[in-house]
Amino acid sequence: MEISWHIKTFSLLFLFIFSRLAPSKTCHPVDKEALLDFKHRITDDPSKLLLSWTASSDCCTSWEGVACDASGRVVDVSRPGLVSDNDFVEDTYMSGTLSPSLGNLSSLQLLDLSNLKDLKGPIPQELGKLSKLTHLFLNTNKLTGSIPITLRYFYQLKRIYLSDNFLSGDVPPSVMKSWTSVSELGLSGNALSGSIPPPIGKLSIGGLAALELLYLNQNHLTGRIPSTISGLGSMIFCRLSENKLSGSLPPSIGLLSKIQRLILENNKLTGKLPSAVGHLTTLTDIFFSNNYFTGQIPSSFVNLLNLQTLDLSRNRLSGQLPPQLGKLKSLQTLDLSYNPLGLVRIPDWFRELRVFRLMLAKTGIEGELPHWLSSSSISQLDLSSNALTGKLPWWIGKMTHLSFLNLSNNGFHSSIPVEFKNLSLLMDLDIHSNNFSGRLNVIFSKEVQDPLGHFNSIDLSRNIFTGPVDDDMGERPAMTSISSLILSHNPFRGPLPKSVGKLRELQVLKLVNTGLSGNIPVELGDARELSTVLLSKNKFTGAIPETLLNLKELKQFDVSSNKLRGRIPPHKAILPVSAFKNNPGLCGPPLPPCKRI
């Protein structure tokens, strides 16, 4: 979406400039014929983007989205799917294919058919005839086939976005070789395969020396990141994530002197992190998560004084963390989760950081929470899947900036301190799989700071919380916007409060093995957004409410192993027999039919 808005803004500016230069001649007949042929191949245009394109009118003066030069030749065609009118934005589409006749627009400089969502078929080889083209935006459609080798004739090309289509095959090296003026290259979200094209960075053969923005993410690229990437001296943004790239990161990457964002996550990269990365002092963001990097974090990272995000999660990093990292005062997000770091405890120098997002899941932390957290400004804290023990300290209530807290899969054993109510910005809480006990009232009745602080998700499963669950739970201010409530495997007992039906944004409700009894409240059917309802292994009695079973969004439903009776209400959702089994009194589809009395 960030790319789409950037393209849209530029296209409108381009169109505005040329619209000021009124052509002295009428639209050239070759250009008019080419554009009418394009319109002829459009099968659906619900917003009538091409309504003004008629044979009886002049394409330079009367056609929306078309601009001409003084000689009457078309230089700009901009009909994107994001249509802006002052503060109003319409998101629309067009169905059809790209006409080969577009290649006859010999003076065309800008072609923007982005975000039309439903343009199909291949990119015509004939587009290669557009030798004056500087900007090509065809992203966010359903284009198929390979990148035509004829695009190598785009000698004046500066920006090209073919992202989010279904393009396949290799990226032709001969095409890249000719794009010596390209500053923005967007090929992400396709099915491109093969290795990273050799011309990237190879200034001996042209290459992409002017390249500033590179998007090759979400493809099927394999092989190594070439050492010649160092030749991309102008590059500011590099995203190669979500591919199958392997091998070690070349030390030559340390020569990208202007790079600000380096995104290599979700690949198969191995080896140690090059200390040369510490030379990239312009870096603001490093995303290297979900690879196979090993060894220690280089101490040279201390030089990255502009760094705001350091995400090295889900790798195989080990060894001591360089204490010099405490000098990275610009750092806002630090994610080292799921690395065998064997931290034992959170290093004291962490208190020197000013991060608002600290993620250290499964890094070997033991013992109690460090007290210095009480004076931090952390907003998102993930310490899950460690070996933390002891009570949840009272000073947790001083961490008033918290919006996300995950302490799941640890060994905490206490009730929730009353000071927890002070977490008025907290929206996501996950403390499942501990030994927390006591009542839930402190959590449900926490304070809010409108419009913030209303729960989005709660997971308290696999603890030893007790009930009964408060009758007015669904009326508490902190609960009004919750979408996911997971309380399974706790010995609550007592009834399920009717007020749960007042949680109008609730989508997921899991109450498996909680000892709840009594009738399933009919009011639960008032929670219209529910898609998952798991109430198995309880002591519910009575009938299944018809309104609940016929919720429009219902996809997953399970009331097995209860004491329910009566006919299963007719329902449209496709539910398996297992969702109702072990209720001796239930009958009717998908169970055996009810016996007539």
Image: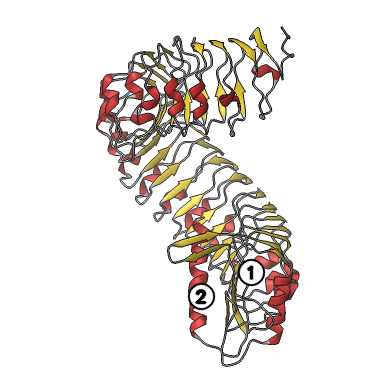
Quadrant containing the C terminus in the rendered view: top right
Residue sitting at the far front? 597
The three-letter code of the residue at mark 2 reads: Phe
Q: Position of residue 147 (x, y in %)?
A: 71, 62
**Above or below — where is 12 with respect to 496?**
below
* Amino acid, disc 1: Ile
- Label 1: which residue? 205
- Please name the residue shown 34% across and 19% down the image: 441
Q: Regarding mark 2 in the picture, which secondary structure is present there? A: helix
Q: Is residue 313 left or right of residue 446?
A: right
Image check: 461 left or right of 181?
A: left
Q: CA distance from mark 2 to mark 1?
A: 31 Å
Q: Residues within 10 Å of mark 1 (few under 14, many from 20)?
A: some
Residue 277 vertical placement versus 428 (above, below):
below
Task: Compare residues 144 and 370 and report the one nearer the observer.
Answer: 144
Q: On the image, which quarter does residue 51 sit in?
A: bottom right
* Residue situated furthest bottom in the rendering: 24
User: Residue 177: horizontal and vertical position, in percent?
Assistant: 65, 68
Can residue 363 be seen here? no
Q: Nearer the viewer, residue 393 or 476?
A: 476
Sooner in the amino-acid sequence: mark 2 or mark 1: 2
Look at the numbered disc 1 and give the secondary structure of its residue.
Answer: helix
Q: Quadrant of residue 482?
A: top left
- Give x and y (percent) for residue 530: 53, 30
Whether residue 198 can be seen here: yes
Q: Quadrant of residue 549?
A: top right
Q: Is residue 289 above or below residue 406?
A: below
Residue drawn at the location 34% of the way across and 50% of the way down: 305
Labels 2 and 1 touching (C-beta < 8 A): no
Count residues near mark 2 (Cα–Cα under 10 Å), then give few for <14, some for 14-19, many for 20+. Answer: some
Q: x, y percentage for residue 450?
A: 31, 39
Residue 14 numbered tag? 2
